[in-house]
Amino acid sequence: MRAGQVARPVQTFSDEYLARCRELSAMDIVRFLDDFKRVHGQVESRSRLISLKVPEPLLAAFKVEARLRGVPYQTQIKNLMRQWLQAAEARPDE
């Protein structure tokens, strides 16, 4: 350690805690991270731009339905992705 530097404590975890962490599902981890960000006031994680080929009639109908519900269509796509993950979480292992 250099002069003027402060020693940082090392965080250790019990074997029981690590075993519990290994049992967490992807949705449990996502919920934990979202809650942690809310509690600690951190900004949302960055979004990633993706390219997705969708048949034009399907996209047009989806946009109309989203507009009728008062939801931006890209927000609705993200909502559907979250719902799909939650449904997958609720299903017993296949």
Image (cartoon, rainbow, N blue to C red):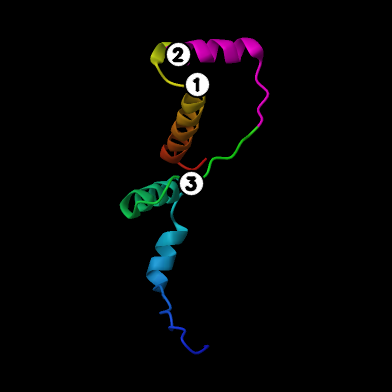
Q: According to the image, label 2 marks what residue?
A: 67
Residue 66 at x, y percent in the picture: 46, 16
Q: SS at mark 3?
A: loop
Looking at the image, do the residues carrying marks 2 and 1 touch, with CB atoms under 8 Å apart? yes
Q: Is residue 92 above or below residue 1?
A: above
Q: Which residues are magenta?
A: 51-67
Query: Which residue is most to the front?
Result: 4
Q: Amino acid at mark 1?
A: Tyr
> Which residue bears the numbered disc 3?
45
Q: Earlier in the sequence, mark 2 or mark 1?
A: 2
Label 1 vs 3, first from the N-terminus? 3
Q: Please state the horizontal and vertical placement of residue 71, each as a whole percent of the image.
A: 42, 20
Instruction: Classify residue 39 as left or right of residue 63.
Output: left
Q: At numbered mark 1, what does the secondary structure look like: helix, strand or loop?
A: helix
Above or below 79: residue 69:
above
- The disc placed on residue 73 is 1
Tell me which amino acid carries mark 2.
Arg
Residue 82 in picture, x, y percent from top left: 46, 34
Q: Nearer the viewer, residue 92 or 38?
A: 38
